[in-house]
C-alpha cells in the first residue's frame, strides 16, 4: 500500500488488509507483516490526508480506528514537526467530521475522535486553537448536541487536568490554570442540565405530599434535615426518565465525578448543585415509581439503567468526601451533604409491610450498595471528628441507621465492609475517651446503647445457632494470601469488634459473652453421658439427624466463643488486674475444666454418626480451649507474681491441671492440630509463667521421660521441636521475682546437660565420621533444628541461662563443625547447619569465646571457595542460594562485633565479598544473595569505618574534614563501585536497599563529605540517579531518589550548580542547545529541599518531553 496510490485505491487496500488481519485464519507471521506495513504507512509525511479521506468514506470500524490512531500518534508525538498550515487544516476538519458524523459513528469511534480533538486542544489551546473550549461549552448548551459536548468535556477533564508526561511542566501548569478559570461556568452548566431534566420529569406538582402515616419520612428526618423544603423535596417519588434524558444525566454525572477528582472544594460547588446530585442519588435506592412522561408511562427504560444514575451520583459524592483538606467555609456544605445522604440511608433502612430492610438492599444494584458503604466509611474515617460536635448533626441517630444498614447487608463482603467502618469508629471513640479523661463517662454514656447493641448483634452473627445457613456458605478450607480461610477472616474481623467494645465496656462485654460460653460448654461437658463402649471402641450415641445438626452448631459456636474469650485476655492484665480478677479467674478455671475434661474423655477418639462433621468439630473445640488457656498465660504470670509469697494453692492447682490436660495429648496418636495446641500451651507456661514447681509436676516428668526415650522420635517434627523448647526453657529461664541465690542453677544446669545429652546422643556419635549414610541425614537435620530452636528461645535471656545452654551444647557444636565439610555439597543439610551456627553466633557468641568463634569463621571461609560459592549461587532459588545467604548473615554478625577480637577477619571478609561473591552475582538476578552481600558490605563500612578512615576526633578538628587520611582505599573504591553498579540494574528492592545504605552511611559517617567521595564519585552518583529518574527506571522510589540527590548536591551546592548541572545538560542526548538552555534556566538555584525537589521533577519531566518531541520530528526539520 503506497502513498502514491489514489485515495480510493488506498482505502480499498486498507479495508482488505484490516479484514485479513482480524480474520481467524490469518497466521501470526502474516499479521506481523501487515502490522509493519501499516506502521510504515503511518510514518509517511502526509499520511493524515489519506486517513481523513478514509474516515469520511468508510464504514469499516477497523479502518476508522486505524485512521484515528494515526491522527493520535501525529498529534501526541509529531505535532511540532507538522507544518502550521496542515495543523490549521486538521483543527478545522476533525471537529467538522465529528459534528456531521457523530450520530452515525459507533460510540467507541466517536469517543476516540473526541480524544484526538482534545489532544489537539491540549497542545494548541488557547494560542492556536482559541475556540476549543468555547466550542465544547456551546455544544453542551445546544439540546441536540449536549451529549456530544459532555463527552468532549469529560475527555478534556481527563486529558488536560492530569496530563501525562508528554507536556512540559510549564504547559501543564498553564492548562490547569486555564481549566480552573472555566470550572464555575462548567459546574453551572452541568447543574442546569441535571435540574432541568429533573424538573421536567418530576411529579412534585401532581403528587400530594405523603401523609404522616405513610412512613416515608421517619422520625429521624426532623433531626437530620432541618429545612422543611429539603425534607419535602427528598420525600417525593423519583421520576422515570426517558432514554435520552437518562443518557444525558449519566454523561453529566460522569463529568462531575471526574471534575470533583481534581478541582478544590470551593464556592463553585453550590448548595444547588449538591442538592441536585442528591436527587439523583435517590435513583439508586428508589426506582419503583412509575411517573408519567408526556402523558404516557415510560416503559422502554430498564429500571437498572435508572439505578446506574444513583451509582454515578454516589461516585460524585464520594469524590467530594475523600478530600481530607476542607476549607472552613465548606464545612457547612459538608453538613448539608451528610444530612442529605443520611436521608437516603434512612430510606434504605426503613421497614414497611412490603419489604424488610434486607430484601430492599438485595433488590438494589450491588454497585450502589458498595458506593454507599464507601460513603459511610469516608464519613466515619475522614469527617466524623469535624461533624460530631455540631449540634445539628444527630450522631446517635446516625449510628442507629448504620447499625440497621450493617446487619441487613445481603452479602458477607458487604457485612465485613460495614464491620470495618465500626472498627474505625471504635478506634476513634477509644482515642477520644483516652484524651478526655475528665468527661470520659459522659462521652461513653452517650454511645453506650449503640455499643451494647453492636456487641450483641456481632456475637449473634458468628453463632451457627442463629445464622447457620449463612455461615455454612463461608469457605473454611481454601487459604487466602494472609493464610486464613474465608470463615477465619470473618470470625477474626468479628472478634476484633468484640475486643474493641470490651476495651470500652469491659464489665458489660464480659457479662454478655460469658453466659453464651457457659451455655455451649454445658452441651460439650454433657457429652460424656452419651458415650457408649462397643466391641470396636467408644461411640457417641447421638444419631438423630436433628440432634447431630444441633450438636454441630453448638460445637462450632463453642469453638468461636473460646476464641473470643482468648482474644479478650489482654483486657484482664496490667492496671486492671485487681479490679477484673474475679472475672478472669472464673474464665481460667472454666478453661482448665474444659481442657481436662477433653483430655480425660478423649472425645477426639470417639466414633460419631457424622464423622466428617462432628469429629473435626470435637477436635477443634479441644484445640481452641487449649489455645484460649494459652492466651491467659500473661494473666497467670501476673497472678503468680501477686501470690508468690502467699498461699499459692489456687495457682498451683491451675498450672497442675493445665499440665495434666496437656501431657496426654503429646503423642503421635493424637490428631496433629490438638497435639500442636498442647505443645504450644506447654511452651507458653514454661516461657511466660515460669513457675518454680513446673518441673516437679508428675505430668511434666512424664514428658521428660517421653522425649528422652527413643519412641519420642516418632512425634511429628514441629511437635518435637516445641516440646524440647518447653523442657529446655523450664530448666534455663530464670524464675520470676527470686534472687540469684534461690534460682537453683547448679541442679538445673545438671538436669539441662542431661536432657541435651540424651537428645543428642546419636548425633554426637557421628564425630569423626567421614562418610555419612543417607538414612542418617534426616536425624542430623532434625537434631540441628531442635538445637537451633533451644538457642533461639534463650538468646535474649540472662547471661546465666546462656552459659548453661552453651555448656550443655558444647560437644554438639564441635561435632557440627567437624561434620560441616562432609555436608558441604548437600545444600539442604548445610542450610540447617548454617542456620544453627547463625543462631549460635547471634545468641551465644560471648559464651562460645573468641578462639572457638574464630575457628568456626575460619572453617567457613576455607570451605566456601570461589568454586563452592559459584556452585551454590547458581542453584537459583534453591537450598544452595540459601546456604550462601546464611553464610553472609553469619559474617554480618561478626563484622558488627565491637572491639578488636574479630578485626583480623576483616580483610578476608571484604575480599570474599568483593572478589568472590560480587563477581558471581553482579550480572545475575540472584536477588536474595545480592541483598545479603550488600548488607554485609554496608555493615563492614558502618561498623568498621576506621578500617578506611583512621582520623581521630582531635585530628578532624585541627585539620578539617577535607584532609582525612585513608587506608585500604582500593577496597573502599571497589565497594562504592559495587553500590553504584547496583543502581544501573532493574531490581527495585536492591536499588531501594542500597540507596538507604548510602544515605545511612552519610548521616552517620558523612560519607558524601569525604574527600575521596566528593572529588571522584559524588557527581557520578548524582548523574546515575538523575538518569534513573529520566528513564523512569524506578518510579516508585522517586521521593527517595530525589532526597538522595539533594543530600549529595548539598555537600557543595556551588559546584553542583556551576559545574555539575552544565556538564549534565551538555551530556544529555536528544535535546538541542536551546532546550538545554531552557532546562538550565528552569532549574532554580534554590537550596531548600521542597524547591530543589520541584526543580528536579521539572527537569526530569521537561527533558523527557523534549526528547519525545525531537524524536518525532521528521528528518531535516529546522528547530527555531
Image (cartoon, grey):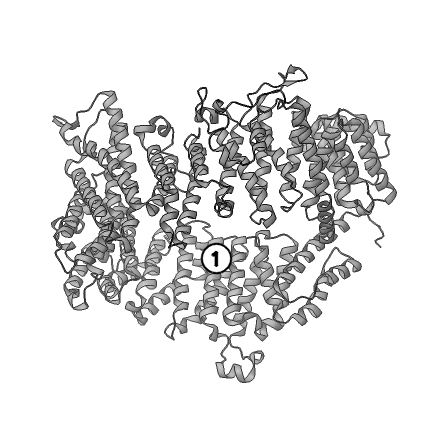
Q: Quadrant of the C terminus?
A: bottom right
Q: Quadrant of residue 463?
A: top left
Within 10 angstroms of label 1, few (less than 14), some, or many (20 or more) residues?
Answer: some
Of helix, strand and loop, which one carries label 1? helix
Q: Residue furthest bottom?
A: 958
Q: Which residue is mark 1?
A: 931
106 relative position to 444: left or right: right
* Nearer to me, 420 or 29: 420
Farthest top residue in view: 296
Q: Residue at coordinates 54% horizontally, 70% vertically from top-left?
A: 1007
Q: Is residue 700 above or below residue 1068?
A: above
Say which residue appears at 60% left-offset and 33% top-offset: 312
Q: Nearer the viewer, residue 1108 or 969?
A: 1108
Is residue 634 or residue 429 the one in the foreground? Answer: 429
Q: Is residue 992 left or right of residue 475?
A: right
Q: Position of residue 325 (x, y in %)?
A: 57, 50
In this picture, residue 783 sits left or right of residue 691 = right
**Quarter the N terminus occupies:** top right
**Left of 948 or right of it: where is 40?**
right
Which percent across, then down, holds residue 747? Answer: 14, 63
Q: Residue furthest right?
A: 85
Q: Is residue 724 visible from the viewing direction of this image?
A: no
Q: Is residue 1070 visible?
A: yes
Amino acid at each position: 500500500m503506497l502513498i502514491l496510490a489514489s485515495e480510493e485505491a488506498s482505502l480499498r487496500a486498507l479495508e482488505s488488509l484490516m479484514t485479513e488481519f482480524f480474520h481467524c485464519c490469518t497466521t501470526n507471521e502474516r499479521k506481523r507483516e501487515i502490522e509493519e506495513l501499516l506502521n510504515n504507512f503511518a510514518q509517511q509525511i502526509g499520511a493524515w490526508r489519506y486517513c481523513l479521506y478514509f474516515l469520511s468514506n468508510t464504514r469499516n470500524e477497523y479502518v476508522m480506528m486505524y485512521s484515528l490512531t494515526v491522527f493520535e500518534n501525529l498529534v501526541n508525538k509529531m505535532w511540532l514537526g507538522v507544518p502550521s498550515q496542515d495543523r490549521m487544516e486538521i483543527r478545522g476538519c476533525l471537529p467538522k467530521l465529528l459534528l456531521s458524523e457523530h450520530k452515525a459513528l459507533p460510540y467507541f469511534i466517536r469517543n476516540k475522535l473526541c480524544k484526538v480533538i482534545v489532544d489537539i486542544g491540549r497542545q494548541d489551546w488557547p494560542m492556536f486553537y482559541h475556540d476549543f473550549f468555547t466550542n465544547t461549552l456551546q455544544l453542551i448548551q445546544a439540546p441536540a448536541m449536549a451529549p456530544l459536548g459532555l463527552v468532549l468535556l469529560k475527555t478534556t477533564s481527563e486529558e488536560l487536568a492530569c496530563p501525562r508526561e508528554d507536556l512540559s511542566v510549564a504547559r501543564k501548569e498553564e492548562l490547569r490554570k486555564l481549566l480552573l478559570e472555566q470550572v464555575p461556568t462548567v459546574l453551572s452548566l452541568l447543574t442546569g442540565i441535571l435540574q432541568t431534566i429533573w424538573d421536567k420529569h418530576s411529579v412534585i406538582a401532581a403528587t400530594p405530599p405523603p401523609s404522616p402515616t405513610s412512613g416515608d419520612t421517619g422520625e429521624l428526618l426532623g433531626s437530620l434535615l432541618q429545612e422543611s423544603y429539603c425534607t419535602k423535596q427528598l420525600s417525593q417519588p423519583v421520576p422515570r426518565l426517558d432514554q435520552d434524558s437518562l443518557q444525558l444525566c449519566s454523561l453529566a454525572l460522569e463529568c462531575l465525578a471526574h471534575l470533583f477528582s481534581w478541582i478544590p472544594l470551593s464556592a463553585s460547588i453550590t448548595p444547588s448543585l449538591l442538592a441536585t446530585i442528591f436527587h439523583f442519588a435517590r435513583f439508586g435506592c428508589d426506582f419503583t415509581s412509575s411517573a408519567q412522561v408526556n402523558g404516557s408511562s415510560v416503559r422502554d427504560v430498564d429500571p437498572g439503567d435508572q439505578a446506574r444514575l444513583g451509582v454515578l451520583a454516589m461516585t460524585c459524592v464520594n469524590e467530594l468526601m475523600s478530600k481530607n483538606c476542607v476549607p472552613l467555609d465548606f464545612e457547612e456544605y459538608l453538613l448539608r451533604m451528610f444530612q442529605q445522604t443520611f436521608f437516603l440511608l434512612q430510606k434504605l433502612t426503613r421497614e414497611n409491610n412490603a419489604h424488610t430492610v434486607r430484601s430492599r438492599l438485595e433488590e438494589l444494584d450491588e454497585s450502589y450498595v458498595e458506593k454507599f458503604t464507601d460513603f459511610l466509611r469516608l464519613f466515619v474515617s475522614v469527617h466524623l471528628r469535624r461533624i460530631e460536635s455540631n449540634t445539628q448533626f444527630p450522631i446517635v441517630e446516625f449510628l442507629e441507621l448504620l447499625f440497621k444498614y450493617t446487619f441487613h447487608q445481603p452479602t458477607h463482603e458487604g457485612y465485613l465492609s460495614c464491620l470495618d467502618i465500626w472498627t474505625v469508629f471504635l478506634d476513634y471513640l477509644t482515642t477520644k475517651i483516652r484524651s478526655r479523661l475528665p468527661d470520659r463517662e459522659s462521652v461513653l454514656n452517650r454511645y453506650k446503647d449503640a455499643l451494647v447493641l453492636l456487641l450483641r448483634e456481632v456475637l449473634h452473627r458468628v453463632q451457627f445457632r442463629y445464622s447457620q445457613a449463612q455461615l455454612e456458605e463461608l469457605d473454611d478450607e481454601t487459604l487466602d494470601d494472609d493464610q486464613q480461610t474465608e470463615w477465619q477472616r470473618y470470625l477474626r474481623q468479628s472478634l476484633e469488634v468484640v475486643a474493641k467494645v470490651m476495651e470500652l465496656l469491659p464489665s458489660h462485654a464480659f457479662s454478655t459473652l460469658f453466659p453464651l460460653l457457659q451455655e455451649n460448654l454445658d452441651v460439650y461437658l454433657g457429652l460424656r453421658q452419651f458415650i457408649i463402649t462397643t466391641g470396636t471402641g467408644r461411640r457417641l450415641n447421638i444419631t438423630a439427624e436433628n440432634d447431630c445438626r444441633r450438636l454441630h452448631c453448638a460445637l462450632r459456636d463453642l469453638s468461636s466463643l473460646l476464641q473470643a474469650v482468648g482474644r479478650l485476655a489482654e483486657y484482664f492484665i496490667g492496671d486492671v488486674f485487681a479490679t477484673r480478677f474475679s472475672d478472669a479467674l472464673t474464665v481460667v478455671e472454666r478453661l482448665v475444666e474444659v481442657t481436662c475434661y477433653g483430655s480425660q474423655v478423649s472425645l477426639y477418639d470417639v466414633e460419631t454418626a457424622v464423622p466428617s462433621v462432628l469429629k473435626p468439630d470435637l477436635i477443634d473445640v479441644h484445640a481452641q480451649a487449649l489455645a484460649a488457656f494459652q492466651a491467659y498465660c500473661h494473666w497467670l504470670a501476673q497472678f503468680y507474681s501477686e501470690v508468690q509469697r502467699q498461699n499459692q494453692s489456687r495457682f498451683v492447682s491451675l498450672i497442675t491441671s493445665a499440665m495434666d490436660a496437656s501431657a496426654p495429648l503429646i503423642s503421635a496418636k493424637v490428631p496433629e492440630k490438638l497435639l500442636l495446641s498442647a505443645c504450644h500451651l506447654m511452651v507458653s507456661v514454661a516461657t511466660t509463667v515460669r513457675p518454680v514447681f513446673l518441673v516437679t509436676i508428675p505430668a511434666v516428668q512424664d514428658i521428660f521421660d517421653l522425649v528422652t526415650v527413643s519412641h519420642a522420635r516418632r512425634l511429628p517434627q514441629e511437635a518435637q521441636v516445641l516440646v524440647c523448647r518447653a523442657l529446655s526453657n523450664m530448666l534455663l529461664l530464670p524464675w520470676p521475682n527470686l534472687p540469684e541465690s534461690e534460682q537453683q542453677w547448679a541442679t538445673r544446669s545438671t538436669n539441662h546437660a542431661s536432657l541435651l545429652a540424651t537428645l543428642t546422643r546419636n548425633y554426637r556419635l557421628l564425630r569423626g565420621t567421614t562418610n555419612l549414610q543417607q538414612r542418617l541425614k534426616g536425624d542430623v537435620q532434625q537434631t540441628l533444628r531442635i538445637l537451633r530452636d533451644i538457642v533461639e528461645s534463650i538468646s535474649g535471656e540472662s547471661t546465666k541461662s546462656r552459659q548453661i545452654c552453651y555448656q550443655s551444647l558444647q560437644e554438639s557444636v564441635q561435632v557440627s563443625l567437624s561434620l560441616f565439610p562432609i555436608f558441604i555439597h548437600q545444600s539442604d543439610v548445610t542450610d540447617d547447619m548454617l542456620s544453627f551456627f547463625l543462631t549460635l553466633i547471634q545468641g551465644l557468641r560471648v559464651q562460645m569465646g573468641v578462639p572457638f568463634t574464630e575457628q568456626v569463621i575460619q572453617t567457613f571461609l576455607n570451605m566456601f571457595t570461589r568454586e563452592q560459592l559459584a556452585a551454590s549461587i547458581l542453584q537459583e532459588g534453591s537450598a544452595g542460594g540459601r546456604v550462601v545467604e546464611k553464610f553472609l548473615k553469619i559474617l554480618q554478625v561478626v563484622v558488627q562485633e565491637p572491639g578488636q577480637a574479630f578485626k583480623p577477619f576483616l580483610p578476608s571478609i571484604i575480599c570474599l565479598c568483593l572478589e568472590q561473591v560480587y563477581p558471581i552475582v553482579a550480572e545475575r538476578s540472584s536477588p536474595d544473595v545480592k541483598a545479603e552481600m550488600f548488607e554485609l558490605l554496608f555493615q563492614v563500612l558502618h561498623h568498621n569505618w576506621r578500617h578506611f578512615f583512621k582520623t581521630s576526633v582531635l585530628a578532624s578538628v585541627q585539620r578539617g574534614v577535607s584532609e582525612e587520611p585513608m587506608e585500604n582505599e582500593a577496597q573502599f573504591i571497589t565497594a562504592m563501585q559495587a553500590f553504584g553498579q547496583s543502581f544501573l540494574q532493574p531490581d527495585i528492592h536492591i536499588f531501594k536497599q542500597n540507596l538507604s545504605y548510602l544515605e545511612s552511611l552519610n548521616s552517620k559517617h558523612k560519607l558524601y563529605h569525604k574527600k575521596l567521595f566528593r572529588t571522584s564519585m559524588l557527581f557520578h552518583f548524582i548523574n546515575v540517579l538523575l538518569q534513573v529518574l529520566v528513564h523512569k527506571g524506578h518510579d516508585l522510589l522517586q521521593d527517595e531518589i530525589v532526597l538522595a540527590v539533594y543530600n549529595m548536591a548539598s555537600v557543595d551546592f556551588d559546584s553542583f550548580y556551576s559545574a555539575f548541572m552544565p556538564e549534565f545538560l551538555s551530556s544529555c542526548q536528544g535535546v538541542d542547545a536551546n532546550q538545554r538552555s531552557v532546562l538550565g534556566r528552569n532549574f532554580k538555584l534554590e537550596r531548600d529541599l521542597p524547591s530543589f525537589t520541584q526543580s528536579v521533577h521539572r527537569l526530569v519531566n521537561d527533558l523527557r518531553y523534549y526528547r519525545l518531541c525531537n524524536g518525532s520530528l521528521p528528518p531535516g526539520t529546522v528547530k527555531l
